[in-house]
Amino acid sequence: MLIILTGNGSLEHPTQAMLDLFTIREELGTVNDLTITFMGDLKYGRTVHSLAKLLQLYSVRIQLVSPPQLAMPDDVRAKLVGNGSLAAESHTLTPEIITRSDVLYCTRVQKERFADLNEYERLKDAFIVNNSVMKRAKSHMIVMHPLPRTAEISEEVDFDQRAAYFRQVCSSGSPGSPYVLTGDFRCAMACTAAWLCLLWCWVRLACPACKWDGVLFCLCFQLSY
């Protein structure tokens, strides 16, 4: 069994990018001719950096949405401008941006990256995707997130068929730590995940106010190993 786990601090996460690309193709059937919106912490979000670079191999339109303090690094942005894929930049998640999106890739504001916690408190809830936002989205748009999440995606969105982040997790292997797996192990993990998804649904129905989703999925996938 081959396991590859890579990542470079706040800079790159190539294996996650490969699996994110796989998720997009599985969900939408293609990567070409899509509008992909990156939202949240684009400065330290290493999955965004790697996926943005990988998407340069395809014909896509990329929209960047972040607070000014958490904008995409200049070198990554310059590459998007250079190949003509940067379609829009905004400091607010406008209805127009949502309406154009085929993929909404959300990232959390990472508390551990801030020396000034007051600044973190100001920025952590800059963007929140909820049912009101989803009403403006295309019927086929998918919402992705490398996980874990905080408040950037409301839990009410979990029940929308366009919420692809838990399916994205199944492609990755575990929340926040993508594994490239081979052989029957991946099949066994998928079967285990199916049962655990049922358990997750039961927990959500039994206790709607509980915030168990991230903890449960982390625990479940660790047990599936």
Image (cartoon, helix red, strand yellow):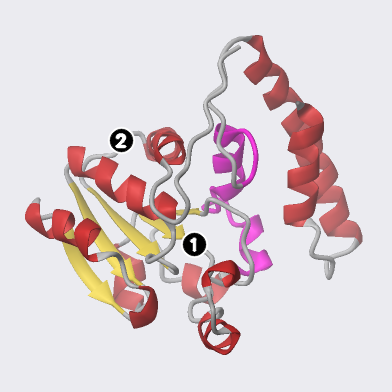
Under mark 1, the amino acid is Thr
* Residue underneath mark 2: 30
Q: Which quarter of the image is occupied by the C terminus?
A: top right
Q: Is residue 162 above or below residue 133?
A: above
Task: Using the image, determine if residue 131 lies above or below residue 169.
Answer: below
The numbered dot on residue 107 is 1
Name the residue nearer the viewer: 85 or 25.
85
| Mark 2 or 1: the one toward you | 1
- Where, by quadrant of the figure, is residue 13 drawn? top left
Q: Residue at x 75, y 55 (%)?
A: 213
Instruction: Report whether 110 appears left or right of 184.
Output: left
Callout 2 secondary element: loop
How far from the left and from the top, in percent, is residue 179?
56, 30
- Residue extending furthest right? 206
**Magenta-tinted stretch:** 153-175
Q: Residues within 10 Å of mark 1 (few under 14, many from 20)?
A: many
